[in-house]
């Protein structure tokens, strides 16, 4: 059974930074496509960033490219999302996703990120 546990969310002001963590069990993060998504109440869950091919390739949604950085730590079996220069529109629940070799999707429970004046 795969389990993903997110942490690192919180309340920050515009321009500040947060780092989200997603620690996996039952799956090796460098052997899966690992992604972050976010969701605002009443809206669909949106793609934010992904890392794959054993951490050699990354992809970002346009709105966060240049501000967010996704990375993995194989020793800790953890994927990170470093979020810099946060904006009000970044407020959402952030979810960790793992797509395994069978193309099955696993999800974490989510962590709240609030950017407020």
Image: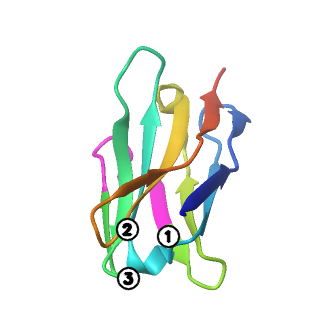
Dot 2 alpha-carbon crowd within 10 angstroms: few under 14, some 14 to 19, many 20 or more:
many
Q: For numbered disc 2, what is the local secondary structure?
A: strand
Residue 25 in the magenta stretch? The answer is: no
Q: Is residue 66 visible?
A: no
**Magenta segment, which residues?**
60-70
At numbered mark 3, what does the secondary structure look like: helix, strand or loop?
loop
Whether the residues at callouts 1 and 2 have beta carbons within 8 Å, the answer is yes
State which quarter of the image contains the N terminus.
Answer: bottom right
Whether residue 51 is visible, yes or no, is yes
Residue receiving disc 2: 51
What percent of the width, then of the height, locates residue 13?
67, 31
| Residue at 37% from the left image edge and 19% from the top image edge | 43
Structural crowding at the residue carrying mark 1, measured as other residues with C-alpha within 10 Å and reported as few (<14), some (14–19) or many (≥20): many
Q: Where is residue 104 in the image (x, y as percent from the top left)?
A: 33, 58
For disc 3, the marked residue is: 54
Residue drawn at (60%, 32%), measured in percent from left and top?
14
Q: Is mark 1 on a helix, strand or loop?
A: strand
In this rendering, the answer to whether 35 lies above or below 72 is above
Side of 93 where 47 appears, left or right: left
Query: Residue 71's mark?
Result: 1
Left or right relative to 68: residue 9: right
Quadrant in the picture for residue 116: top right
């Amino acid at each position: 059974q795969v389990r993903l546990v997110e942490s690192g969310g919180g309340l920050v002001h515009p321009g500040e930074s947060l780092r989200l963590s997603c620690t996996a069990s039952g799956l090796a993060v460098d052997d899966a496509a690992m992604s972050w998504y976010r969701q605002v109440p009443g809206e669909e869950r949106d793609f934010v960033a992904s890392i794959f091919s054993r951490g050699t390739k990354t992809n970002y949604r346009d709105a966060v490219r240049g501000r967010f950085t996704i990375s993995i730590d194989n020793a800790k079996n953890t994927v990170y999302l470093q979020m810099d220069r946060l904006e009000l529109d970044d407020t959402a629940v952030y979810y960790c996703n793992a797509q395994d070799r069978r193309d099955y999707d696993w999800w974490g429970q989510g962590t709240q990120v609030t950017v407020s004046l």
